[in-house]
Amino acid sequence: MMSMNIGFIGLGNMGGAVAKAVSQVDDTNLLLSNYNPTKAHALQQQIGGQLLSNKEIMTQAQVVFLGVKPHQLSSLLADLKGQATPADQTIISMAAGVNLADLTEMLPNKPIIRMMPNTPVEIGQGMTTYTTLDGQASPLFEDLMVYAGQVTFTPENLMDAATAIAGCGPAFVYQFIEALADAGVQNGLSRQVALDLAAQTVAGSAQMVSQTKKHPAQLRDEVTSPGGSTIAGVVALEKHGFRYAIISAINKALKKTKKLGKN
């Protein structure tokens, strides 16, 4: 890939995680901006790049990642309106729920990509979905995200659902890991040992789903012996509505994502 300036406006948890992944791509010059200069400087110390104003980034970057909250996006772009920008500039928005039509109104005549990463992109284990104006996969975007983990093109009508699962899902998984560890502590394990057991169990189980391509129910059955300990635990989860709780959490997150895009 030819050397290019890659700008980041907004370096919160998600924007910062993506910047860390992109910083590993060869021949990229990072241009960083954040409303919190201390946070921006701390990230620059980790990944390099230049600290610039939003306007400077818009005038210099061939690709601009917008990592601001949905309710901040309109005012941000209004402030930047009229700036001279590179002719081939591509804008990539991380604003949850803000669709391509609304982005195009705010950014006419520009190639736009709508993306939703999750925080594990910071360690190269993320799940990022994205969509484009022309409905085609973007080699440029996938090249920039090559160190972020898995990247999947998604039709725009499914982006909010993908956001609820992949974007919000890590928080639910962390809660599950914490609960597993709490049970371990309750039964005599040290906190660190319990966390190590829980985290690796979740990581390994996820890899089994990804690598074997078996249905999760089949993999569960392979662990569940007749009359054994595991089935006793499975019954307890069913009794307390475990699956219903997870599905409800995703649906609540989806509903909120759609609402955020309309603010």
Image (cartoon, rainbow, N blue to C red):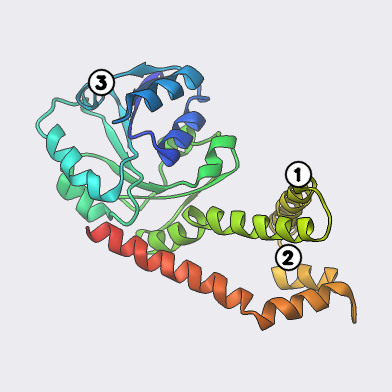
Q: In terms of sequence position, does the residue under pointer 3 or pointer 1 come before the other?
A: 3
Residue 171: tell me if it is visible.
yes
Helix, strand or loop status at disc 3:
helix
- Residue 214, label in figure: 2
Residue type (three-letter) at the residue carrying disc 3: Gln
Give how far across and how far down residue 225 sits, in percent.
Answer: 89, 75
* Quarter of the image where the C terminus is located: bottom left
Along the line of sight, the residue nearer the viewer: 54 or 60 = 54
Q: Classify residue 34 as left or right of residue 167.
A: left
The image position of residue 119, as x and y in percent, is: 51, 43
For disc 1, the marked residue is 192
Comparing 4 with 206, the one in front is 206
Around disc 3, counting alpha carbons within 10 Å, would you say few (fewer than 14), some (14 to 19), or many (20 or more)? some
Would you name the residue on which mark 3 appears?
60
Q: Amino acid at mark 2?
A: Lys
Which of the image's four quarters has the N terminus?
A: top left
